[in-house]
Image: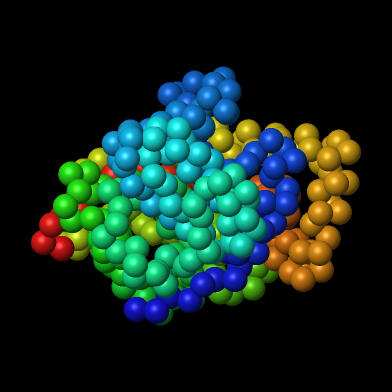
């Protein structure tokens, strides 16, 4: 099926790429803390990179596609291991940043792939993009399963069937308490501040996306992939999100905040509603952090490893 690119996602990452580097954050991946919140974020993030690349057995000559490559930090890690990395993203600025580092990054939508890529990879990493693949409107129309089924069909086509690896690893936020998709299409003031629907509406309008629920990806993988490993990384995302919030606040209290405001002004003039919604979501209501904070959080982060099924 045809899955249109969501402009809200492009705007979101364009804004992030103007702000986050000023806080020392060049990518938006959670760390792996091993249960110790005192672990420095940079160390925890390296743990995450190592985990992802170990799961796909990345080493010299291994051909890896990164879906949603961001600013190229994981592509750099692939290169350090001697792997051959290709990244795709829907954000033009990210392509430019990657290419300036000599990385192979291409402006390409995952649902509108160049067929020349089919069958050319040993492994695929999708570190965060899947939560943007379905939008509330599509979910309200019952299209989510079909989109995820198409996702797995595309992943299957991209992997070389002769490869001894033929694996995919993803990290994806899932709903633990799933809202009705149609509810997130209603005005924000329809919901009590602090309620699940209030926070989820802000998140959808800030970043673009409607998460899968537990078990949905396994069901939609069909005959294409077998789930071989699943690790709950929710607590790691909680520690990471709190660190991001600390860094954002520190930056805004310094002269950095003025530089960020200047860099963001053109984007703010083009997309004022979404950018102001993002600021509200991240700093005022703290909806991003809310979804991971409690002992029974409304969202859950899963790290999943899949093996390609030959007869898919």
How many marks the image carries: the answer is 0
Instruction: From the viewer's side, name the closer residue of 202 and 261.
Output: 261
Residue 83 sits in quarter: top left
State the colouring used for the structure image: rainbow
Instruction: From the viewer's side, name the closer residue of 125 and 75.
Output: 75
Q: Position of residue 154 (x, y in %)?
A: 31, 65
Q: Residue at x 85, y 46 (%)?
A: 259
Q: Residue at x 20, y 53 (%)?
A: 308
Q: Position of residue 281 (x, y in %)?
A: 67, 54
Q: Position of residue 235 (x, y in %)?
A: 47, 34
Q: Report the side of 135 relative to 145 (left or right).
A: right
Q: Is residue 112 visible?
A: yes
Q: Residue at x 47, y 67 (%)?
A: 109
Location of the N terminus by quadrant is bottom left
Q: Residue at x 25, y 40 (%)?
A: 229
Q: Residue furthest left?
A: 311
Location of the C terminus by quadrant is bottom left
Q: Report the side of 178 relative to 121 (left or right).
A: right
Instruction: From the viewer's side, name the closer residue of 7 and 194.
Output: 7
Q: Is residue 182 above or below residue 296?
A: below
Q: Position of residue 72 (x, y in %)?
A: 54, 46
Q: Is residue 13 above or below residue 292?
A: below
Q: Is residue 230 visible?
A: no
């Amino acid at each position: 099926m045809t899955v249109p690119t969501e402009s809200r996602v492009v705007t979101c990452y364009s804004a992030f790429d103007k702000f986050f580097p000023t806080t020392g954050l060049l990518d938006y991946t959670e760390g792996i803390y091993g249960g110790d919140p005192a672990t420095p974020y940079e160390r925890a993030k390296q743990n995450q990179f190592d985990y992802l690349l170990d799961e796909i057995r990345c080493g010299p000559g291994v051909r890896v596609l990164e879906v949603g490559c961001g600013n190229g930090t994981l592509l750099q890690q692939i290169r350090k291991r001697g792997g051959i990395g290709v990244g795709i993203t829907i954000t033009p600025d990210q392509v430019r940043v990657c290419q300036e580092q000599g990385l192979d990054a291409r402006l390409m939508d995952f649902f509108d792939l160049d067929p020349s890529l089919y069958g050319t990879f040993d492994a695929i990493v999708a570190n965060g993009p899947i939560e943007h693949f379905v939008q509330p409107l599509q979910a309200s129309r019952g299209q989510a399963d079909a989109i995820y089924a198409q996702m797995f069909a595309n992943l299957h086509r991209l992997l070389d069937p002769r490869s001894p690896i033929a694996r995919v690893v993803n990290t994806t936020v899932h709903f633990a308490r799933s809202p009705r998709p149609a509810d997130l299409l209603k005005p924000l003031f329809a919901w009590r501040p602090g309620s699940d629907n209030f926070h989820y509406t802000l998140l959808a309008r800030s970043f673009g996306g409607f998460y899968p629920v537990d078990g949905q990806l396994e069901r939609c993988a069909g005959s294409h992939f077998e789930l071989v490993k699943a690790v709950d990384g929710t607590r790691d995302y909680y520690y990471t999100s709190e660190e991001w919030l600390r860094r954002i606040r520190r930056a805004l209290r310094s002269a950095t905040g003025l530089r960020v405001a200047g860099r963001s002004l053109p984007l703010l003039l083009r997309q004022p509603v979404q950018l102001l919604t993002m600021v509200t979501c991240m700093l005022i209501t703290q909806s991003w952090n809310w979804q991971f904070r409690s002992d029974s959080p409304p969202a859950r982060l899963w790290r999943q490893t899949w093996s390609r099924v030959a007869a898919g």
